[in-house]
Image: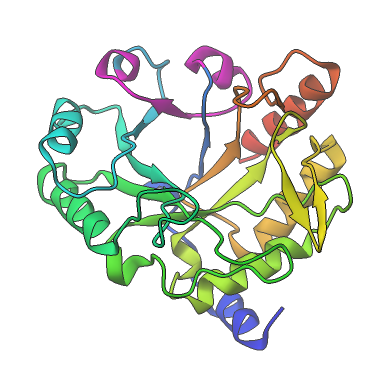
Amino acid sequence: MSTLLMMLICSQSALSAGGNGKTLHYTSGGPSVAIASAGFDLADVQSVEQLNALPPGMKGLIWLNESSGVTPRFIAKVKPFIGNPRLFGFRLCDEPDITGKYHPPAVSPAALKAEAEWIRANVPGAVTFVTLMDMGSFEAPAFMNTFNPANTGIDLFGLDPYPVRGKAFDLDFIDRTVEAAVAAGIPLDRIVPVYQAFGGGNWKTRTGAAADVYVLPTPDQAKQIFARWATYSPAPVFDFAYAWGSQNGDTKLGSASPEALELRLAFKAHNTAQ
């Protein structure tokens, strides 16, 4: 851990989690009743009907999948949610790529800033959020000259270092990722921890020079991930378990396997500890 990051951690004030001191817990791809049973209180939502059907006490984070600026399609997607008391905010897009090389087309900070400013002006109190794409490597994460609060106006940024792999379980990957984000202009209190809650399937990665795969964390590994993240974000506005539903043949938090059921218990304990 760098000296600068240690100083930031020591000097940061208590975060205004959820506006009332309570961290919300979000997961993507899961039905609201099921995720509520595991202690999640922030749901992945795409329609007003889904938002209105949430269980009491649960808020909705709207998946927009929009990164081209304030287009007619963007406005049409946002407008139906204006004034809805169950609305928490908007997830603009997932891992925007400023280069367009990995996730085309290229996304500009100006386009995201226009979206964030439109939401701020027209949906008062709604949070804007994106997860960030790591432009570096497992050994040296990098976010420099991509997206940050200054050039996008976005409220919160998710970081998703997944440390459980076939060839390694490296909690220091979290440290390296946070340090890189802070160096790129993202304050600690704007960071949303993204916890690994998947493994297997067809996802591929690299650890060092070797091809590698993701492995579903054990409950003990999940607890270690929670603890390491708490060093940097002891009370984030919300945290994010990726993910509940399978997307690529993988085992996720919502799977029916014994390993997934055990992991869900670890997440439930974490989510209900406050």
Q: Position of residue 58 (x, y in %)?
A: 42, 25
Residue at left offset 45%, top offset 48%: 103
User: In the picture shown, does residue 146 fall above or below 261?
Assistant: below
Q: Please give left or right for residue 62 compared with residue 273 in the image.
A: left
Q: Give whichever of 215, 174 is nearer the camera.
A: 215
Split into 4 quadrants, where in the image is the N terminus?
bottom right
Asked whether 179 falls inside the magenta stretch, the response is: no
Q: Position of residue 10 (x, y in %)?
A: 60, 78
Q: Give whichever of 105, 162 is nearer the camera.
A: 105
Q: Position of residue 43 (x, y in %)?
A: 45, 27
Split into 4 quadrants, where in the image is the C terminus?
top right
Residue at left offset 29%, top offset 20%: 47
Report which quarter residue 197 is drawn in. Answer: top right
Q: Give whichever of 273, 66 is nearer the camera.
A: 66
Q: Please give left or right for residue 30 compared with residue 252 in the image.
A: left
Furthest residue to the front? 101
Q: How many marks?
A: 0
Residue at left offset 60%, top offset 51%: 160
| Coloring scheme used | rainbow
Q: Please give left or right for residue 41 compared with residue 232 in the image.
A: left
Asked whether 48 falls inside the magenta stretch, the response is: yes
User: In the picture shown, does residue 158 fall above or below 99?
Assistant: above
User: In the picture shown, does residue 252 fall above or below 69?
Assistant: above
User: In the picture shown, does residue 205 fall above or below 272?
Assistant: below
**What are the residue bounds of the magenta stretch?**
31-51
Q: Please give left or right for residue 19 compared with residue 114 in the image.
A: right
Furthest residue to the bottom? 3
